[in-house]
Image: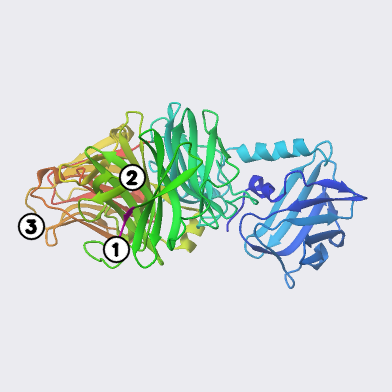
Amino acid sequence: MGAVPEFLLRKLVVPGSLKSAGQGFLFEINNTFVPVNLLRFNLRADGQDIPSEQVTIIHPGVQSVTGAQVTPQQPFELPVNTPMRIEVAAPPPQKELTIQAETREAGLLQFSIPTHSGIDDQPRFAGLRNFFRRLPYYPRIIKARLDPQRPKAHFAAPAHWLNDPNGLIYWKGRYHLFYQFNPFGAVWGNMHWGHASSPDLLHWQHMPIAMAPDPGGADAGGCFSGCAVDDAGKATFLYTAVWPECQCLAVGEGDDLKSLHKHPTPIIPAPPSGLEVEGFRDPCVWRQDGEWRMVIGSGLRGVGGAILLYRSADLRAWEYLGILCQGDIHQKEPLWTGTMWECPSFFPQGDRWVLIVSACHSDGALYTLYLTGQYADNRFTPDDPARLVDFGAGGCYYAPQTFLDESNRRVIIGWLREARSPAEMTRAGWSGAMSLPRLLSLGADGSLRSAPIDKVDTLRGTRERLDQPGQISTLHGPSLEARFTLPTHCDQWTGVEVITDAFAQPLRIGYDPDRGVLLADCRAAGGLLSEAPLDLAVEDRTPIRIFLDGSVLEVFAGDRIALAARYYLTTPSQARLRSVGLAAIDLWETVV
């Protein structure tokens, strides 16, 4: 679970519940994080210990125990979303109440609640909680900030776990990135919406947590992925709440969107009746013919992935229109499209429509696919079989979201998944990063093209040119960009090797003529082998662009091939590049 920031632990105390009661006082706690076992439970009032036998924990309808009865031999289970009343037979605190809870799962948790002029000052107490909730979230796990493997040019949360990008929007002169975030550890769980803003999609400012699960609400189990739209001048967010999965709505507050005000009830409380679905999540919304349209990711049991289509006049009352598009669980070639499609993005591009989905199945994520075709009569008809959005192995590039930038161009950002174990992520104190923003376009052949946005060039610092094979760069560091052009004919492996003194085997990024593939081999540093078919006879596929950033790798062959991967060098600051079979390589240090 990792260290939990004190201002988040304060959320355990139910607002307004701290009150005088006879000769003592009482309050309520509600655990909305993860189930834990209490090994000890102690209170302090104004710095003085309260005898544990004077503290009673009441689980309504189940059991009551005193603090003295909570021991490692007789732990007290604190479940999720079950309010507990704490009654204390001691004088109420005048300045501060301190709660100490030793847990089996997270160690010692301790936090204090200032009571100011009196514990019955409910509005003031609630205001204090709101103040803490809106404080910018700074990492409490210092090692996460100092980790040399953390990227600089690729966005990562201040600490702990990050996954899907959510609610991407250009609003009042700034870009806003919301994302799936676990504020309590570097593994998946406790889904909140993290938030960052930027003037250019490259330099990000961390903002307060935008949304947290409400213990008594539809999203008590977590605030899952969603999108953002401009509803008559109001930034409006649609997202999935769990459990069960349903669709909810929130409206941004202020120009900086520092917090989101939730609609009191789900806008779509359940999947359509009569469908046996596998998943019902991740709304994508757009404006069409004077009304709103929405697609939701799903799957039909025994059939395959499916995208469900809805419409609405006001974003709050929705009508189901049917299945927009569905896959075939039995078709394995050219790509298996899984049993469920999540994180859909559906948008027009030129004379076609594009559907992007992240395919998954019961064992987890597969990869991100796209289809292009025609959209008419509430149905999407693909022109060709599904193709990969990104060729990174292991589904490294996953759950992307698209939106329109300030110039009305279609931009996509994806989650770059880790290739290391949960134990390694916990030790590092952070997990997950976002891809560089990519500009999307459509080729004449119907293929989806992508390349880094042009502003990425502004991150270039010191430059070096390698002009002969075998040359090793003097530039080194965790964050580098390299550009080169593959020769028209390659009869041997050609590209770059990433070398450090700590690794006997290099990372290899280049072209393998034996298999006709562009590859990124990160196996020497705990990563995977990624390959993408590359035809050197097509001239505009030969320019190669590489971004190395801490533990993140992105490779582009023109705008036709994108490949994301993860690697874990012990000392990425010592990484240098060696030319293999290339006439020239241009190299820059990346500066953010």
* Picture quarter with the N terminus: bottom right
**Mark 2 touching mark 1, by CB under 8 A?**
no
Which residue is tagged 2?
Answer: 346
Going by the numbered disc 1, the residue's amino acid type is Asp
Along the polypeptide, which appears first: circle 1 or circle 3? 1
The disc labelled 3 sits on which kind of residue?
Answer: Asp
Mark 3 lies on residue: 491
**Horizontal relation, residue 5 to residue 351: left or right:** right
- How far apart marks 3 and 2 lie (CA) works out to 41 Å
Neighbours of disc 3 within 10 Å: few (<14), some (14-19), many (20+): few
Q: Residues within 10 Å of mark 2 (few under 14, many from 20)?
A: many
Q: Which corner quadrant holds the C terminus? A: top left
Q: CA distance from mark 1 to mark 3?
A: 40 Å
Say left or right for 488 vs 141.
left
The residue pinned by badge 1 equals 328
Decide whether residue 343 is among the magenta residues. no
Mark 2: amino acid: Phe
Residue 71 x %, y %: 76, 68
